């Protein structure tokens, strides 16, 4: 640097020229050496110095710095002589001539860098859109201004785009392009569109324009990257692809597609792009993409193309979509596919949506809350997620408007043409001037859907003189609805209607004819026996079948009278009739014509006559009994049997027998029994026919001689219970066994019988014997029954007296029957006393008795406590007497000794003395018992000392063995 600087002049040192190509390019402008005058030097930092001045070319700037510890430089020389660069100027002239355009280069400069990644020298340059660094080479920098049709067209779209900032690398003697230029300033926004990072690439055969477009739609910013190509002849296309989507409520930037467009959640527009053209009204932008319903690669996937156009950057109010590809598009796509995708609700109960097919559809994604009116359908307004499509269901098709409501469902409305069938059916809208509307609505309440159906035809129907507004509901295979009719001669009825497509109709109704005031005559053996008022007894079935030019109506009527054959008639029409008013009269006349033929044989059977008796609307010419007696020649017995066989009304049957056949009232029961009536029928006839009380009916039937079982059951069938039955049996002095039999027939338990028999003053032993003899009960069952009404003494006395139960058996029976030990002892004592044959207070007799009671108890209780409890409950005994009883019962002496010690506090001497003196047990054995009972050695030794010596006077011996008191 020192060698180059002389005063205020500077000459570029030859030592800096290390690159031959750069040196050659510099020599293109500088024949000798580059010299600065009026030079100035500025030290930027320890590694960089800048020299500025006026060169022999023009103003120049040189920056010298260290790069990897080696000297390097960048040089800028402004306004060079471009005539010395013919390879560039001629190349540009050639390119622009193809496009009928002229260009000028201004503010040009030569930029030289001796090393890669050198700081960009911004001094003396007019361009702003450069990078921060520059690589080794020689560059031309300039502003490129171009005029011509293609550029005028671009400026018509984007606004002013020139001059362009040009920065291209030079090569000695040759140039093949391309030249990349940047717009000096970003074009002005086009409505809501922002343009940035714009550049133009000039190539040998075309000119490319690249830029970023930012489109703000509601809260989303869509960034597109793209551009277009200008070709000779003025043709061009400009296409942009979605680069990223920035949402105001999210930090992340998405690049896979536009998710939740216009705020409609749940789906994404992918492959989104923008096309730009210049139309008559300004810059037109086309937004296009696709929506995929279903998994990628699936044969069931549906691809929808989405797009819209908008002018001069005005935000689009709607996106439009149509199906591009689908395996189902020919047959129609199930509506359920779109409902599940766009509303995010499962089909669930709306299964008919699977049958609804749509095709030739256009989907509208509408952002404008006021709706969108497509230019092709200005009369329609679409809101939210809407669709226009051809819809078909159950052979009905129409053009429809569909609206998807997220998390709610779908609403559809389409108009059909007026439906006219068979010359009598006309289905229109409410006004009658247009066809019915096809409605699909899953967004309503359950009550609304239940009433109208989520798929229905909203219509007015005219049929057989009736005009009604109805919702024709879609069912699995047809559309169905109901028409209500109020026609003279019919009771009100509903006609169930089915519409298959728009060309087939079927209707049917079960009807009741209203033949009030109309009668038919019944005859037997050629004589009139009754008249029948038909009223509403005639039932019918109305069936209607209609096609475009076909009419078929069938009306079947049936009269069913009790016991008579079915009478049916049928009327058919194959030509249209305007109403149904004449049909009832035709049916009535047909019935009258068939009455005699249909009923002739049947009415000669008296049963048929009886079946008609008492029925509503049937009026006999005389009393039924008189007809049977006079016309049918039947006697009282025969008629009674007929009445029984057909379950004729008992009250009317009795009236007939008493009045028409003169049966004596008091003899009615005997007459019925002799005729063969079972007890149940006789009881029913007596009670209902003679209006007897239950007690009187029971008394009468029991006195007729029926088997008691049969009589009891028969009476029970008419409401006589066991209380009434047993009371009547008792009143009429029937034996106890009869009462038991009767109550048993009514399923009374032995316990219930015992209580009732006791109430009727029967004794315990009588009851016990009757239960055993009549019902075959064993002793235990008898005991359990007696227990419900008697105390233990009465129970035991009955068992001992009537069943001869012995003491041992008595103990077992009472134990099994749940009695306590004291009660068992009482019962056993009664049995023992009966066996001994007398009752005495003599001690000897009591000893015998108590011993037998104890032995009987021991068969059931093998422990001293139980025996002691039982014996003490019936006898007052001393401990010594009880110990003797234990011994008699053969309890182990050691157990007796232990019991006496624990319960009576007898010591060894007391126990030993009792065993030896009262029971006569050998002394050695007694000592052994005492040891086994757990007495101490000391206590036993004391006993040994107290043992009396053998011998002595008679009085001493008596004192030694005193009599045990009882």
Image (spheres, rainbow, N blue to C red):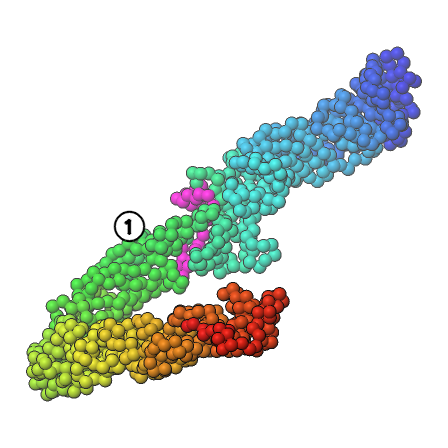
Is residue 387 part of the magenta span, yes or no? yes
Q: Residue at x 51, y 68 (%)?
A: 900
Q: Residue at x 56, y 46 (%)?
A: 268
Q: Residue at x 81, y 28 (%)?
A: 118
In which quadrant is the N terminus drawn? Answer: top right
- Toward the top, the furthest residue is 7
In percent of width and height, residue 884 lies at 48, 75
Q: Is residue 696 left or right of residue 238?
A: left
Let me know if residue 70 appears in the view: yes
In percent of width and height, residue 23 lies at 87, 28
* SS of the residue under disc 1: loop
Q: Which residues are magenta?
A: 372-398
Let me know if residue 642 appears in the view: no
- Toward the front, the furthest residue is 953
Q: Nearer the viewer, residue 900 or 394?
A: 900
Q: Is residue 172 left or right of residue 382?
A: right
In which quadrant is the C terminus drawn? Answer: bottom left
Q: Residues within 10 Å of mark 1 (few under 14, many from 20)?
A: few
In percent of width and height, residue 258 lies at 57, 43
Q: Residue at x 29, y 76 (%)?
A: 764
Q: Nearer the viewer, residue 65 or 669?
A: 669
Q: Is residue 193 above or below residue 780?
A: above
Q: Is residue 247 above or below residue 609?
A: above
Quarter occupied by residue 57: top right
Q: Nearer the viewer, residue 729 or 656?
A: 729
Residue carrying label 1? 431
Quarter occupied by residue 378: top left
């Amino acid at each position: 640097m020192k060698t180059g600087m002389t005063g205020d002049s500077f000459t570029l040192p030859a030592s800096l020229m290390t690159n031959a190509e750069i040196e050659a390019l510099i020599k293109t402008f500088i024949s000798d050496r580059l010299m600065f005058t009026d030079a100035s030097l500025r030290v930027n930092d320890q590694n960089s110095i800048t020299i500025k001045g006026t060169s022999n070319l023009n103003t120049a700037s040189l920056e010298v710095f260290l790069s990897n510890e080696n000297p390097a430089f960048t040089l800028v020389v402004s306004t060079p002589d471009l005539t010395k660069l013919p390879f560039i100027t001629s190349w540009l002239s050639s390119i622009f001539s193809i496009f009928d355009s002229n260009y000028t280069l201004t503010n040009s400069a030569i930029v030289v860098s001796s090393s890669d990644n050198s700081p960009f020298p911004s001094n003396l340059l007019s361009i702003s859109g450069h990078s921060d660094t520059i690589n080794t080479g020689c560059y031309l920098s300039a502003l490129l201004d171009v005029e011509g049709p293609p550029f005028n067209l671009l400026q018509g779209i984007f606004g002013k785009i020139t001059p362009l900032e040009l920065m291209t690398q030079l090569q000695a003697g040759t140039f093949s392009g391309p030249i990349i230029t940047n717009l000096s300033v970003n074009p002005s926004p086009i409505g809501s569109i922002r343009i940035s990072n714009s550049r133009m690439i000039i190539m040998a055969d075309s000119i490319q324009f690249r830029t970023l477009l930012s489109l703000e739609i509601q809260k989303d910013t869509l960034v597109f990257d793209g551009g277009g190509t200008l070709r000779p002849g003025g043709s061009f296309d400009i296409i942009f692809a979605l680069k990223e989507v920035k949402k105001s409520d999210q930090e992340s930037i998405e690049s896979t597609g536009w998710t939740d467009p216009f705020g409609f959640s749940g789906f994404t527009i992918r492959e989104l792009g923008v096309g730009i053209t210049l139309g008559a009204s300004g810059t037109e932008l086309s937004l296009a993409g696709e929506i995929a319903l279903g998994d990628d690669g699936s044969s069931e996937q549906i691809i929808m193309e989405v797009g819209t156009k908008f002018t001069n950057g005005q935000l689009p109010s709607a996106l439009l979509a149509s199906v591009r590809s689908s395996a189902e598009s020919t047959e129609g796509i199930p509506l359920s596919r779109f409902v599940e995708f766009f509303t995010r609700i499962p089909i669930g109960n709306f299964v008919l949506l699977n049958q609804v097919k749509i095709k030739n559809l256009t989907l509208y994604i509408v952002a404008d809350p006021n709706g969108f009116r497509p230019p092709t359908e200005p009369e329609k307004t679409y809101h939210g997620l809407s669709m226009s499509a051809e819809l078909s269901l159950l052979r009905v098709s129409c053009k429809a408007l569909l609206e998807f409501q997220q998390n709610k469902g779908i609403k559809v409305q389409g108009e059909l043409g007026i439906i006219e069938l068979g010359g009598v059916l006309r289905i229109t809208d409410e006004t009658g001037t247009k066809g019915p509307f096809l409605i699909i609505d899953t967004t309503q309440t359950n009550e609304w859907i239940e009433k109208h159906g989520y798929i229905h035809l909203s219509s007015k129907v005219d049929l057989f003189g009736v005009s009604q507004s109805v919702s024709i509901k879609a069912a699995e295979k047809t559309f169905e609805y109901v028409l209500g009719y109020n026609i003279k001669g019919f009771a009100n009825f509903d006609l169930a209607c089915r519409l298959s497509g728009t060309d087939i109709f079927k209707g049917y109704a079960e009807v009741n004819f209203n033949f009030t005031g109309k009668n038919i005559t019944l005859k037997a053996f050629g004589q009139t026996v009754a008249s029948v008022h038909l009223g509403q007894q005639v039932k019918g079935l109305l069936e209607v079948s209609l096609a475009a030019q076909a009419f078929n109506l069938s009306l079947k009527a049936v009269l069913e009278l009790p016991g008579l054959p079915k009478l049916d008639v049928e009327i058919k029409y194959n030509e249209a009739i305007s109403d149904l008013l004449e049909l009832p009269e035709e049916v009535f006349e047909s019935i009258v014509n068939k009455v005699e033929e249909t009923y002739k044989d049947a009415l000669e059977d008296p049963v048929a006559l009886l079946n008609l008796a008492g029925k509503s609307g049937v009026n006999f010419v005389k009393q039924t009994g008189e007809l049977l007696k006079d016309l049918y020649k039947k006697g009282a017995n025969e008629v009674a049997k007929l009445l029984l066989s057909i379950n004729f009304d008992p009250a009317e049957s009795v009236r007939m027998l008493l009045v028409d056949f003169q049966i004596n009232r008091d003899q009615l029961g005997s007459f019925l029994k002799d005729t063969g009536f079972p007890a149940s029928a006789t009881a029913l006839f007596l009670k209902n026919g003679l209006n007897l009380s239950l007690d009187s009916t029971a008394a009468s039937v029991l006195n007729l001689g029926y088997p008691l079982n049969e009589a009891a059951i028969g009476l029970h069938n008419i409401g006589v219970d066991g209380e009434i039955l047993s009371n009547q049996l008792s009143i009429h002095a029937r034996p106890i066994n009869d009462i038991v039999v009767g109550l048993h027939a009514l399923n009374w338990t032995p316990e219930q019988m015992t209580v009732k028999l006791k109430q009727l003053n029967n004794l315990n032993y009588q009851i016990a014997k009757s239960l055993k003899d009549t019902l075959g009960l064993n002793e235990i069952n008898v005991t359990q029954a007696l227990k419900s009404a008697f105390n233990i003494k009465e129970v035991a006395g009955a068992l001992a007296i009537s069943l001869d139960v012995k003491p041992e058996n008595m103990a077992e029976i009472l134990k099994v029957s749940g009695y306590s030990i004291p009660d068992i002892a009482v019962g056993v004592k009664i049995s023992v006393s009966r066996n001994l044959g007398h009752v005495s207070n003599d001690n000897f007799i009591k000893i015998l008795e108590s011993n037998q009671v104890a032995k009987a108890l021991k068969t059931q209780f093998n422990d001293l406590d139980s025996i002691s409890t039982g014996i003490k409950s019936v006898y007052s005994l001393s401990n010594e007497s009880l110990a003797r009883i234990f011994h008699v019962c053969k309890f182990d002496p050691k157990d007796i000794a232990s019991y006496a010690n624990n319960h009576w506090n007898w010591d060894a001497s007391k126990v030993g003395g009792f065993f030896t003196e009262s029971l006569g047990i050998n002394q050695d054995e007694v000592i052994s018992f005492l040891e086994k009972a757990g007495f101490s050695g000391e206590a036993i030794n004391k006993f040994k000392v107290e043992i009396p010596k053998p011998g002595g006077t008679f009085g001493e011996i008596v004192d030694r063995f005193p009599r045990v008191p009882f």
